[in-house]
Image (tube, grey):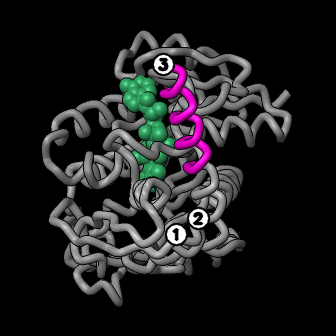
Amino acid sequence: MKSALVFGGGGFIGSHLVKRLKNEGYWVRAVDLKFPEFSETQADDFVIGDLRDQQVCDRVIDRGFTEVYQLAADMGGAGYIFTGEHDADIMHNSATINLNVADRCLKRNIKRVFYSSSACMYPAYNQENPDDPKCSEDSAYPAAPDSEYGWEKLFSERLFLAYNRNHGMSNRVARYHNIFGPEGTWTGGKEKAPAAICRKVAYAQNGGEIEIWGDGLQTRSFLYIDECLEGTIRLTRSSFEGPVNVGSQEMVTINRLVEMVAEIAGKKIHKNHISGPTGVRGRNSDNRLIEQKLGWKPSKSLYAGLEKTYEWIERQIGRNAVEASKA
Ligand code: NAD
C-alpha cells in the first residue's frame, strides 16, 4: 500500500493534502502541534508532536514512506510575518524543523521530501512596481527578501537542495504564492488577505465600511487550495526538483479583491484605508517554468475560489453566533 507522511498535517494546506492523499488510497501519517481546527483529520495516524524535537522526528520517521511532505512552519499572514515581533521565533522554529526533517529523513533512507517554500523569498527590489513585479525562479538572487520569514524559506530550500547534491536525495522545492480556501485561518491575527477580507465583508452591513491595510493598490495573486494540491503532488511525483513557483498569474489589487468579495456577498462596501503591514508593492506568480516542466497551470478563476471561501467563512460566522447565543 502506498503511504505518505505529512508534516504540518494539522495546518491549512496539510489537512487538505491529507484528505487528497486519503482519497487516492494512501495510508497517511500526519504530524503537527495540533489537530486540524475546522474538521476531523482523515489521517490514519495523527501524531501530536513538536518537530523541533529530534526525538519526535525519530519517532515519526520510523520507516520508509512512498511520499513525504514537509509543510510544518511557524507562519501567518502579514499581521504575523511583517510586524517584526515574531522574527526570532519564525526563523528559529522553522529552520529547526527543516534541519531535523532533512537529516532524519536521510538517516531513514527516505530519498525524497517535498518542501513548501514561499514567494516571500523573492527579492523586495523586484516587487516595487505593483503593475510589473518580477518573480521568475531565476530572479531569486542577489537575495533580498523583505521578511525574516522569506530568509528562512530561502535558507531551507537551499538546505533541501544541498541534501540532493551532497547526499543523493531527490527533494522537491515549491514556492507557494498566497494559498487560500475553506478551512484556512480566518480570524485571530494569522489569517491572510482573502480570508480577512471575506470575514470583514461578511460582518459588514450592506452599504457599510471595512478597514483595508495600506492604499489597496498593492497587487497579489492568490491560488485556490485544490489547485495548490495538484501542483504539489505533480511536482513531488515528477523528475523535476525545482525550485518552482506554484501560484496563479491572475494578479489583482487588494482593492479589486475587496470588490470581488463584496460582489459575491451582494453588498455595497466602502473601503477605509488605514496604516498596517502590507509587504511588497506587487507580487505575481510567474508560471512559465512550471508549465514547461510539469504542464500545470491553475484551472479555475480567482473569483470561483473566492465564492467557495466566502461561503465557508459566512458559515463559520453563523456557527459562532449560534454558539455564542447558547453560552
Ligand atoms: P499553517 O500554519 O496552517 O500550517 C503549518 C502547520 O505547521 C501548523 O498546523 C502548525 O501547527 C505546524 N507547526 C508549526 N510548528 C510546528 C512544530 N514545531 N512541530 C510540528 N508542527 C508545527 O500554514 P499553511 O498555510 O498550511 O502552510 C503550509 C506550508 O506552506 C508552510 O510551510 C508555509 O510556510 C508554506 N506556505 C504557505 C503559503 C500560504 O499562502 N498558505 C504561502 C507560501 C508558503
How far apart in space, not on screen, are marks 3 and 1 (Cα)? 31 Å
- Mark 1 vs mark 2: give the one in front: 1
Q: Earlier in the sequence, mark 3 or mark 2?
A: 2
Q: Which residue is mark 2?
A: 306
Residue 221 location (% of width, % of height): 47, 72
Q: Is residue 228 left or right of residue 90?
A: right
Q: Is residue 73 left or right of residue 129?
A: right
Q: Which residue is mark 1?
A: 261
Instruction: Give the residue type at disc 2.
Output: Leu
Question: As displayed, is residue 10 above or below residue 313?
Answer: above
Residue at image position (31%, 67%) is 122
Local crowd size for mark 3, using a 10 Å CA cut-off: few (<14), some (14–19), many (≥20): few
Question: As displayed, is residue 248 above or below residue 185?
Answer: below
Viewer-nearest residue: 313 or 2: 313
Q: Which residue is mark 3?
A: 327
Rendered-image quarter of ligand 1: top left
Question: As displayed, is residue 222 above or below residue 191?
Answer: below
Instruction: Give the residue type at disc 3.
Output: Ala
- The answer to whether the residues at label 1 and label 2 have Cβ atoms under 8 Å apart is yes
**Magenta: predominant secondary structure element?**
helix
In the picture, which quadrant includes the N terminus? top right
Q: Secondary structure at mark 2?
A: helix
Q: Secondary structure at mark 3?
A: loop
Q: Which residues are magenta?
A: 313-327
Residue at image position (21%, 33%) is 89
